[in-house]
Image (cartoon, rainbow, N blue to C red):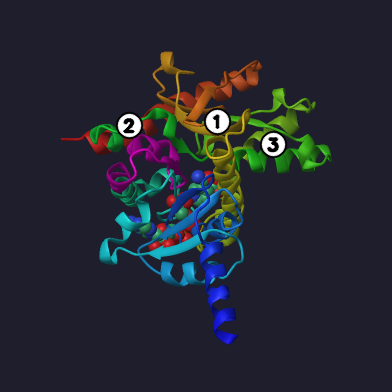
Amino acid sequence: MFATRQISSIAKRAFSTSASSNAAKVAVLGAAGGIGQPLSLLLKQSSLISHLSLYDIVNTPGVAADLSHINTDSKVTGHTPDNNGLKEALTGCEVVVIPAGVPRKPGMTRDDLFNTNASIVRDLAQACAEHCPKAHVLVIANPVNSTVPIVAEVFKKAGVFDPKRIFGVTTLDVVRASRFVAEVKKVPTDQAKITVIGGHSGVTIVPLLSQSGHSFTEEEVKALTHRIQFGGDEVVKAKNGAGSATLSMAFAGARFTNSLLEATVAGKKGIVEPTFVKSDVFAKEGVEYFATNVELGPNGVEKIHPVGNVNEYEKGLISAAIPELKGNIAKGQSFINKA
Ligand SMILES: NC(=O)C1=CN([C@@H]2O[C@H](COP(=O)(O)OP(=O)(O)OC[C@H]3O[C@@H](n4cnc5c(N)ncnc54)[C@H](O)[C@@H]3O)[C@@H](O)[C@H]2O)C=CC1
Ligand SMILES: O=C([O-])CC(=O)C(=O)O
């Protein structure tokens, strides 16, 4: 009797962690970090994930053991560089999310992170190109305006580049914009849907408040625009040396990952998220990557939405963003292509 019960409970556990055909293996690289842990917690709740594969240079066995007790159906594994851990973490992945890298301290720009994070992202991208070349790669590590071109150049060198599958995660900018506008207009956040285009740092973050359906005074536009562009600095300052946004970023990263899984794994149509991707929108101005709203489909980027109508103030914001973006993108590209 005892033996039977024991066998059936083992069978149930095995069943509860088995892969479902319409669920994917998803890896989080940097999974033990400030973003990685809460992001992994949120992803553990997704029924579209069969296997959550957590990689970091430290501490993932503990994070994975902890998350694996949550009674959702995905399997959770933890990997470190030991025993070919990165290869094991990535093999079979359909989606790889990369929050690995150092965060800002007060007084730093995102570009100041380049020296440390560029090589971290390059090495992880190389491993993705080798072990899961068809995966959708979601780059959170800053500076996003440079790290996305880094991943793309690594994939090009490996001969596996697909521009539809490499994404810079800019979701936090629209999450913040929605919250800040809702506060000013005193409306629920679902009535504050704000388009944000450009890139993910300071003046390259361009909110299009004129498209929101709300009216603003000139002072409100200026204050909101500044707050959306420099929202990250608010958190860096408040954390006072202990890092940058982690919890709101985990929320935003999970939102983007879930949207992508709905489009790719569940085959839902019409899913639109803002994201920094290879784009023709400002190609004439020499900008190769740009964030706009993007419809997601089974193969990643399905359709890049145009910028739409913008007013004179927003045209000025776009003009200020373009040279900075071009510089950030070129810096990432030449990091990989330098002799
Ligand atoms: N795209 C966005 O909107 C946002 C991006 N970020 C960026 O995300 C990155 C991570 O931020 P936090 O989680 O707060 O930092 P953190 O320092 O708390 O965590 C980073 C993790 O990366 C790991 N790591 C370092 N090198 C690694 C490697 N080679 N392979 C695997 N893992 C490695 C570390 O061990 C650590 O656990 C930063 O670059 C930050 O600027 C942060 C907020 C928003
Ligand atoms: O500000 C930072 O360094 C982190 C980040 O990208 C954000 O919070 O938007």
- Is 38 above or below relative to 7? above
Question: In the image, is residue 106 above or below residue 209?
Answer: below
Q: Quadrant of the C terminus?
A: top left
Question: Disc number at residue 223?
Answer: 3
Region rendered in magenta: 125-152
Q: Position of residue 246 (x, y in %)?
A: 55, 56
Residue furthest to the right in view is 186
Q: Amino acid at mark 3?
A: Ala
Q: For disc 3, does the CB lie below 8 Å from ligand 2?
A: no
Q: Which mark is residue 78?
A: none
Considering only order in the chain, which callout, 3 or 2, is on the residue closer to the N terminus? 2
- Asked whether, in this view, residue 57 is left or right of residue 110, the answer is left
Q: Which image quadrant for residue 57?
A: bottom left
Secondary structure under the numbered disc 3 in the rendered image: helix
**Left or right: 56, with 37 as reference point:** left
Q: Is residue 77 above or below residue 317?
A: below
Any magenta on residue 136? yes
Q: Which residue corresponds to the image point at 60% horizontal and 59% vertical from the top-left? A: 238
Q: Can you give x and y, in whole percent of width and height, for residue 99 in the image?
A: 45, 52
Residue 279 belongs to the span the image colors magenta:
no
> Which residue lies at the image location 30% right of the left edge and 63% below the top edge?
81
Disc 2: which residue: 161
Q: Quadrant of the N terminus?
A: bottom right
Query: If you read the primary sequence from the N terminus, does the residue marked by circle 2 or circle 1 appear first?
Result: 2
User: Which picture quadrant has residue 85?
Assistant: bottom left
Q: Which residue is mark 1?
A: 296
- Which sits in the foreground, 124 or 51? 51
Q: Residue at x 38, y 34 (%)?
A: 328
Amino acid bearing label 2: Phe
**Contact, mark 2 vs mark 1 (Cβ under 8 Å):** no
Camera-nearest label, 3 or 1: 1
Is 221 on the left or on the right of 164, as rendered?
right
